[in-house]
Image (spheres, rainbow, N blue to C red):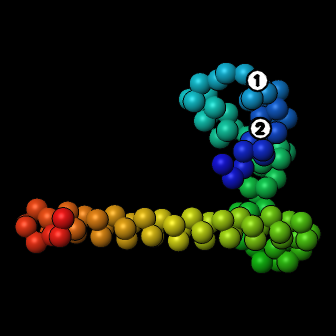
Amino acid sequence: MFDEDLIIASFAQQYGIRLLREDISVREYRKLLKGLNGETSLGYVVNIRSETDPKKIKEMTKTEKRIRSEWQRFRAKQKQNNGQTITMTVEQFQQALKNLAGGGNG
């Protein structure tokens, strides 16, 4: 998971919950994750990643710009992988239809 360390640190910081030591339900985890504020490690990083104001982006520190560019590369790779998965799935579906119609090789 891309932000696992940030999530673990943020839960400890905001809620005092040690995720690796405590058991919480998935439902509770999701609700608490949505409630993390900008004062946590994850909140800080999410604010950097989601900034769209060119002036604010220009004023970011080197570290903030690195965080932002790493996220953009990660998202671009995800989109590329999703596109490849969809293409492969469509090709597999087309082959299955050919096989059903008796025109496939296998």
| Image location of residue 43, percent across then percent down | 77, 49
Residue drawn at point x = 45 percent, y = 70 percent:
83
Task: Please give the residue where the numbered disc 1 appears in the rendered image.
Answer: 21
Residue drawn at point x = 57 percent, y = 30 percent:
26
Q: Secondary structure at mark 1?
A: loop
Amino acid type assigned to the residue bearing label 2 in the image: Ile
| Distance Cα–Cα, label 2 vs label 1 | 11 Å
Q: Spot the residue most to the front.
A: 106
Along the polypeptide, which appears first: circle 2 or circle 1?
2
Instruction: Determine which quarter of the picture holds residue 66.
Output: bottom right
Task: Please give the residue where the numbered disc 2 appears in the rendered image.
Answer: 8
101 sits to left or right of 27:
left
78 sits to left or right of 82:
right
Q: Spot the residue most to the left.
A: 102
Residue 36 at least partly seen: yes
Residue drawn at point x = 81 percent, y = 73 percent:
57
Q: Are marks 2 and 1 in contact (CB under 8 Å)?
A: no
Residue drawn at point x = 7 percent, y = 67 percent:
102
Amino acid type assigned to the residue bearing label 1 in the image: Arg
27 sits to left or right of 38:
left
Instruction: Determine which quarter of the picture holds residue 93.
Output: bottom left
Q: Which mark lies nearer to you, 2 or 1? A: 1
